[in-house]
Image: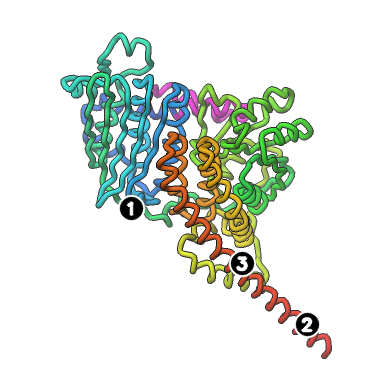
Amino acid sequence: MSAIISIAEILLHDDTLISWHRKYLQDIKAEADVLLSNLNILFDPAVEIAGKRSLVPTSFDFRQLLDGITSLATIFANRKDLEFVYELEGDIPSHLYADDVRLRQVLLNIIGNAIKFTDTGSVTFRVASGVGCLRFKISDTGIGVDEDSIPRLFQPFVLLDTEINHKLPGSGLGLPVSKHLVELMGGTLEVSSSPGNGSTFIVTLPKILGDERAVEATVSRTGTLYSPDTRVLVVDDNEISLSLTTGLLKSLHGIDSDVALSGPQAIEMVGRTEYHLIFMDHMMPAMNGVETSAHIRNLGGFNTTVPIVSLTANAVPALNDSLFRTINDFLSKPIRKHELETVLHRWLPDHLRVSHHIKKQQAGSAREAAKSFYKRLANIKEIDSRVGLKNAAGDYEMYEHSLKLLCDKIPMITQLLLELLDQRDLNELAIHVHGMKSSLAGVGVGALSDMATKLTNAARQEDYNQCRETLPFFVEELRTMGRRLQYVFGEAARSRRMRAQKLAEEAEADSAL
């Protein structure tokens, strides 16, 4: 394993590698690193001491970690026509202090096993935040095991049912490693199961809140990639998400983007223009991002290799699933500026990448207008402008524009959601509520974004009663926030008119002198 890692490292230093080969080598090295870590934990004679040294706690974005895990799990559950249910309970913290790499490894191991040993039904992932602790509950409707066999699940290389396991990949390392890591993190791993009735794994860990400032310091950069000659297409049916994505590309990287509001429109546009990079929304009505990407690949020529980055509210980076061979990379929504820059560095040709630090200076009058606007915005309790402004890379003008798009969209989208509920069209309801989840998260409306997540899950599970109970409250909350936003924008417009009039009068008085 060490030799594989060393050879990969040597090859990665070859400047003649094409992007695809480099990406595959990076994936090989990453997977080898994980496997070597697992082997060290299992075979180190001083495993407890070495294991404790292997933990590297840090402050990290907890919600982003959960999004990545659930996105990956959803994809692999869908491959087996299984339902994947994701639920949140309690006040889920935004940032934690722990070993995020090990936590992700544990949860993916257990969820992966649940999917592997479940042929019909569902896998459910519940995350609950309690006093001083976090609980992760993974339940499935799979084959299950008898009570006497449960201890053997945590013995290395032990496969309980040779006939079943003969058909499935795996070495029997996942659960022993997971149990060991959970205990190193000061937690517990409990299991209950019975043959034919599935299994439930419960991971309980201490809840230590992370420092958001430390996370921001880790990802901050002194310079920004600047690439004004890059041709980019952004495909998204959500105008608010579209505004944020194109705004970030322009504001941070000097990239003017073409936009498409649907899959068919995107296919038509790539037939006319050779793009260097395509950002593709995952969930779109009629034709989703994966289907659109497949059509683009089938056009041939330049479009067979143009990098396509999937934009999704639950993205996981560098995923190489066979169903997603048409997609090169993934980017979470709302987009983080450092993640966007990482994607640009990864996929843009060398001749387009120019290191350039961008600073935007605002005129004094515009700065005063921004301060006035955000002072009024602070009275809307549903909106955390600090989060929204961070998602807009600190660009006040871009953030205000995104809020205005949301404000204008609320009357139409709330009416549409109610009509879809009346028509019992839960599939379309899930698509549109999911889109609102991204929009709300992008501008810093966390509570309503979480509510949209629960509504989306209910609609996907065809739980009409739950949708009927929750949607009216969601709609009313949206409309109330919309009315408050309308007032803020009205006051801001009046303030700007008065300021402009005052400046004009001062200029006129100066000219008279």
Query: Depth check: 45 or 132 in front?
Result: 132
Q: Main secondary structure of the magenta part?
A: helix
Q: In what element is the residue under mark 1? A: loop
Q: In what element is the residue under mark 3? A: helix
Neighbour tally class for label 1: few under 14, some 14-19, many 20 plus, Cα within 10 Å = some
Q: Earlier in the sequence, mark 2 or mark 3?
A: 3
Q: Residue at x 59, y 29 (%)?
A: 290
Q: In what element is the residue under mark 2? A: helix
- Report the magenta residues as a range: 1-30
Q: Earlier in the sequence, mark 1 or mark 2?
A: 1
Determine the image quadrant of residue 331: top right
- In the picture, measured across the screen, residue 299 lies left or right of residue 89, that is right
Q: Residue furthest front?
A: 422
Instruction: Give the numbered dot on residue 507.
Output: 2
Which residue position is annotated with label 1? 209
How far across and how far down the image is residue 297, in percent? 67, 25
Neighbour tally class for label 3: few under 14, some 14-19, many 20 plus, Cα within 10 Å = some
Look at the numbered discs 1 and 3 and tell me whether their residues touch, using CB distance below 8 Å.
no
Q: Nearer the viewer, mark 2 or mark 3?
A: 3
Instruction: Give the numbered dot on residue 489.
Output: 3
Instruction: Name the colouring of the figure.
Output: rainbow
Q: Residue at x 46, y 64 (%)?
A: 381
How far apart are the alpha carbons under marks 1 and 2?
54 Å
- In the picture, measured across the screen, residue 340 lies left or right of residue 8, that is right
Figure check: 254 above or below 349 = below
Q: Callout 3, which amino acid?
A: Phe
- In the picture, measured across the screen, residue 7 lies left or right of residue 111, that is right
Residue 99: tell me if it is visible: yes
- In the picture, measured across the screen, residue 511 lies left or right of residue 453, that is right
